[in-house]
Amino acid sequence: MQEKQVKVELPTGLQARPAAEFVQLANRFSSHLYLEKEGKRVNAKSIMGLMSLAVASDEEIIIFGDGEDEDKAIQELAAFVTE
């Protein structure tokens, strides 16, 4: 299992459209992917789970991956929230 802590730099955080795009990106990978904020961990492939975290801009999150393409998945998801 790999993990990476990143600061969300999206102007709106992971709300509405960015959250949906994040989930779509996560679903392209076969690895199990999770996102954690303040000790609460959710499935990164679940829009409802992601929305429940209410991730705002400038907040720190941790992206976890477990599977054969975990490195690439974590890299791409981290790049998505920091652009």
Image (spheres, rainbow, N blue to C red):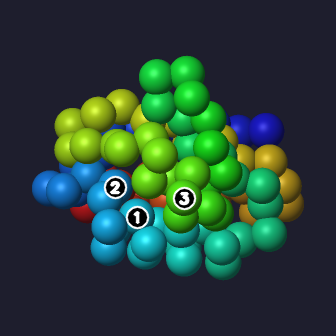
Q: Earlier in the sequence, mark 1 or mark 2?
A: 2
Toward which corner of the image does residue 54 lie, by quadrant? top left
Task: Classify mark 1: helix, strand or loop.
Answer: helix
Toward which corner of the image does residue 4 lie, by quadrant? top right
Kind of residue sitting beneath label 2? Leu
The residue that label 2 is drawn on is 14
The residue that label 3 is drawn on is 48
Who is closer to the viewer here, 12 or 25?
Answer: 12
Alpha carbons under labels 1 and 2: distance apart: 5 Å
Screen quadrant of the N terminus:
top right
Left of 56 or right of it: where is 75? Answer: right
Left of 71 or right of it: where is 11? Answer: left
Tell me the tag on residue 62: none
Residue density around tag 3, few if under 14, some if 14–19, many if 20 or more, within 10 Å: some
The residue that label 1 is drawn on is 19
Are the two marked residues, 1 and 2, in contact with CB atoms closer than 8 angstroms?
yes
Kind of residue sitting beneath label 1? Ala
Who is closer to the viewer here, 29 or 51?
Answer: 51
Alpha carbons under labels 1 and 3: distance apart: 9 Å
Alpha carbons under labels 2 and 3: distance apart: 12 Å
Picture residue at 47% right of the left edge, 31% below the top:
37
Picture residue at 57% right of the left edge, 29% below the top:
40
Of tags 2 and 3, which is closer to the observer?
3
Who is closer to the viewer here, 77 or 14?
Answer: 14
Kind of residue sitting beneath label 3? Met
- Can residue 75 be seen here? no
Q: Earlier in the sequence, mark 2 or mark 3?
A: 2
